[in-house]
Image (cartoon, rainbow, N blue to C red):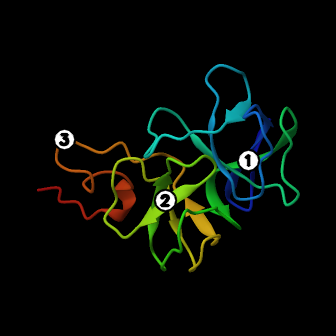
Amino acid sequence: MNTALNRTVVAVLTNKSGGAHAQGDVCVIDTGTASAVINTTTSGYVNGAVAICLEPNGVANNAVGLYALGGFVPKINLSGSASLGDVFKTHTVAKQAVRHAAPLVTGDFGIVFETGTTPKAWLFGSINQGSAVGDSDLALPALKARSFL
């Protein structure tokens, strides 16, 4: 079952990662199990959807919980302290995202709203896939200036 709560895209998913998820943990949709999430250690993961654990008390392995796929999240676990406006992608450490300053690069899936290692953030709802023109020349078409001449 999927729903939108306060403009956050939320899915009820089963944690199949082999360990517990805490609020703010970064995971990906499992392509081998229906309605499930697993951990990834792929930097800049682009082969599916990224999800963030929303449950304040976490989600045990093989348990069901709420995960955000897009929109606002109250917390995301980062590998280092973020600055306002930093963007992030999956990290080589499971359950974390790695932040960096703009522009967007392949694998980016959100932007932070405050400083720190567990800031509030906005998930784009899709992953920046990069482009032949350059990594920053993509995603979020509504935010790019366009010429129709």
**Mark on residue 67?**
1
Place residue 72 in its image quadrant: bottom right
- Discs 3, 1 touching: Cβ within 8 Å: no
| Residue located beneath label 3 in the image | 132
Q: In the picture provided, is 133 more to the left or to the right than 115?
A: left
Q: Amino acid at mark 1?
A: Tyr
The kind of secondary structure element at disc 2 is strand
**Nearer the camera: disc 2 or disc 1:** 2
- Residue 109's spot in the image, x, y percent? 49, 53
Residue in the foreground of this view, choosing between 24 and 113: 24
Among the two numbered marks 2 and 1 on one chain, the one whose residue lies closer to the N terminus = 1
Give how far apart the Cα atoms at labels 3 and 1 are.
Answer: 32 Å
* Residue denoted by label 2: 98
Q: Position of residue 128 (x, y in %)?
A: 39, 48
Closer to viewer: mark 3 or mark 2? 2
Left or right: 123 as drawn, with respect to 52: left
Eyeballing the image, is 111 above or below 9? below
Say what amino acid the circle numbered 2 marks: Val
